Image (spheres, rainbow, N blue to C red):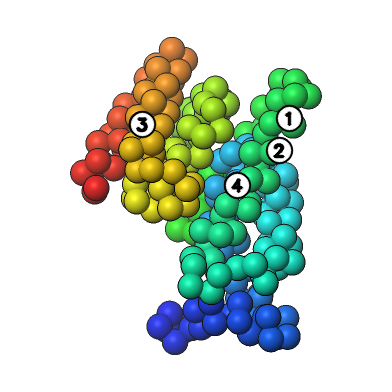
């Protein structure tokens, strides 16, 4: 396995692209495509659409590399591009009023799951997990884009309040407020959904306490 310390930084790769080395952009794509996909699929809840949006985000970032500040975080920059595309997609879908819900699993590099569930074997347990996951994403449908985004950054990406503040361009106090109300709304929706929802609500509470413990 390559030593991460020996790998070129994002800024070094961007500088190489700007000097004409188009192949230098591929390592950036490989470095961040899974993380971006995890965030975008959590927003749009459609795997195919999420892949398209992430691809468009990389295209837009490549086309606008000359506006990127080399002393900035490339991930924060492209994350903002991808999330803006996802939010626009959600708003267009809402205007169309399709009322459809596409189930998607929030995958991440280490194969973790948002609001991680206890996995057991057997068809009955697998069905219960599937139904619970569906409840979680259906509940997320009721959140605002801002609440959903901050919840995903915290629960899926595992970012600190300071990192979320930088990514979203909002004060840490606003991050804490949005996260509090997002968790509270999710827990209420899951409790109202029945026994499986209550289990998920308990899991969400555990994650919330764990998150506060790591601040």
Looking at marks 3 and 1 on the same chain, the residue that comes earlier in the sequence is marked by 1
Q: Which residue is identified by label 4? A: 83
Disc 3 to disc 4: CB gap under 8 Å? no
Query: What residue is shown at x 74% (from left), y 66% (from top)?
Result: 63
* In this view, 19 is above or below 159: below
Is 164 in front, or is 122?
A: 164
Whole-angstrom CA distance, mark 3 to mark 1, is: 27 Å
Q: Which residue is identified by label 1? A: 93
Residue 77 visible in the displayed image: yes
Whole-angstrom CA distance, mark 2 to mark 3, is: 25 Å
**Could you say where residue 27 lies in the image, as x and y percent from the top left?**
60, 76
Mark in the foreground, 3 or 1 = 3
Query: What residue is shown at x 63% (from left), y 53% (from top)?
Result: 81
Q: As drawn, is 98 to the left or to the right of 1?
A: right
**Could you say where residue 150 lies in the image, as x and y percent from the top left?**
45, 40
Residue 175's quadrant in the figure? top left
Looking at marks 1 and 4 on the same chain, the residue that comes earlier in the sequence is marked by 4
Whole-angstrom CA distance, mark 3 to mark 4, is: 20 Å
Q: As drawn, is 91 to the left or to the right of 206?
A: right
Residue 23 visible in the displayed image: no
User: Which residue of the protein is positioned furthest toward the right in this rendering?
Assistant: 96
Disc 4 to disc 2: CB gap under 8 Å? no
Q: Which mark is residue 89?
A: 2
Query: What residue is shown at x 54% (from left), y 22% (from top)?
Result: 142
Classify mark 2: helix, strand or loop: helix
Classify mark 1: helix, strand or loop: helix
Looking at marks 4 and 2 on the same chain, the residue that comes earlier in the sequence is marked by 4
Q: Which mark is residue 177?
A: 3
Classify mark 3: helix, strand or loop: helix
Query: What residue is shown at x 59% (from left), y 59% (from top)?
Result: 78
Residue 59's quadrant in the figure? bottom right
Disc 2 to disc 1: CB gap under 8 Å? yes
């Amino acid at each position: 396995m390559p030593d991460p310390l020996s790998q070129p930084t994002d800024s070094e790769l961007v500088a190489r692209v700007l000097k004409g080395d188009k192949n230098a952009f591929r390592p950036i794509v490989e470095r961040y495509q899974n993380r971006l996909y995890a965030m975008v699929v959590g927003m749009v809840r459609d795997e195919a659409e999420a892949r398209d949006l992430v691809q468009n985000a990389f295209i837009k970032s490549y086309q606008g590399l000359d506006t990127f500040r080399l002393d900035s975080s490339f991930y924060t920059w492209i994350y903002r591009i991808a999330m803006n595309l996802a939010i626009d997609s959600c708003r267009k879908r809402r205007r169309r009023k399709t009322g459809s819900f596409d189930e998607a699993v929030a995958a991440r590099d280490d194969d973790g799951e948002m609001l991680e569930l206890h996995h057991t074997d057997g068809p009955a347990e697998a069905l219960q997990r599937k139904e619970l996951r569906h409840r979680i994403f259906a509940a997320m449908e009721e959140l605002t884009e801002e609440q959903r985004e901050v919840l995903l950054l915290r629960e899926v990406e595992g970012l600190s309040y300071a990192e979320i503040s930088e990514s979203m361009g909002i004060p840490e106090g606003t991050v804490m407020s949005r996260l509090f109300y997002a968790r509270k709304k999710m827990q209420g929706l899951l409790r109202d959904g029945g026994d499986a929802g209550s289990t998920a609500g308990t899991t969400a509470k555990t994650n919330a306490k764990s998150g506060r413990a790591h601040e």
